Amino acid sequence: MCYNATDPEQAAIDTLLIGYGNALRSDDGVGPAVVELIRQSLGEAFSASVACRTELQLTPELAAIIARADRVIFIDASVAVPAGRVTIRRITAQPTAACLGHQFSPPQILELARLAFGGVPQAWVVAVGVQSLAVGQGLTATVADTARRLAGHLRYHLPPIGKPSFHWTSRNTRLSH
């Protein structure tokens, strides 16, 4: 079962899924949409150590939750990827100049988790190419189809009860179109 990781006192998290973006800007909401699809599809066959978060943006408050995870998968919309395509890349904490706002990049939030809480999870960014960022609710047909396929792919790679997080990294992570 996928739970919301909101209590900083909860147990360690094997896998933290963070889908972020603005659901009021069409395809920009693909990250939260993918996480919601995964949340809806998870049953008792999966351990409670899988946490799901949907966010408008990455904020410093997430650092405490990220620090408790063994691995974090950030899911976001991208204009740098062709519409309906997906890229997955491994990332690490990245020391950068101080953030002037309240929004962080995945490497910056990982660095904050390391500095403030001593947690250094394995991390990946899953970028989904968008077709439209116009004001409006709902994904375009192309991106909605990709979101469904991606949710199924990521769900397949979540660790079953009793399996550690390396379960995901030891499998083939190719997402065919």
Image (tube, grey):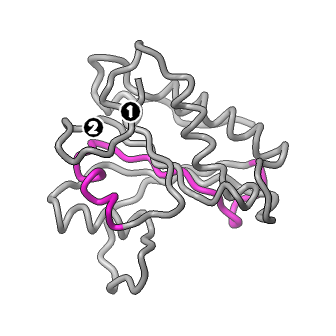
Residue 51 position, x and y percent, is: 37, 37
Q: Eyeballing the image, is 118 above or below 39? A: below
Residue 120 appears left or right of 91: left
**The residue tagged with tag 2: helix, strand or loop?**
strand
Frontmost of labels 1 and 2 is 1
**Mark identifier at residue 3:** 1
Q: Which residues are magenta?
A: 60-84
- Is residue 79 in the magenta section? yes
Q: Which residue matches tag 2?
A: 13
Residue 89 position, x and y percent, is: 50, 53
Residue 88 appears left or right of 62: right
Residue 26 position, x and y percent, is: 76, 56
Residue 145 sits in quarter: top right
Seen from the viewer's position, the closer of residues 114 and 56 is 56
Residue at coordinates 32% horizontally, 32% vertically from top-left?
A: 166
Residue 64 sits in quarter: bottom left
Residue 88 position, x and y percent, is: 54, 49
**The residue tagged with tag 1: helix, strand or loop?**
strand
Name the quarter where the N terminus is drawn. Answer: top left
Q: Residue furthest right?
A: 141
Q: Are marks 1 and 2 in contact (CB under 8 Å)?
A: no
Residue 88 appears left or right of 158: right
- Is residue 29 in the magenta section? no
Seen from the viewer's position, the closer of residues 43 and 130 is 43
Name the quarter where the C terminus is drawn. Answer: top right
* Mark 2 residue crowding within 10 angstroms, few (<14) / some (14–19) / many (20+): many
Mark 1 or mark 2: whose residue is earlier in sequence: 1
Kind of residue indicated by mark 1: Tyr
Residue at coordinates 23% horizontally, 55% vertically from top-left?
A: 120
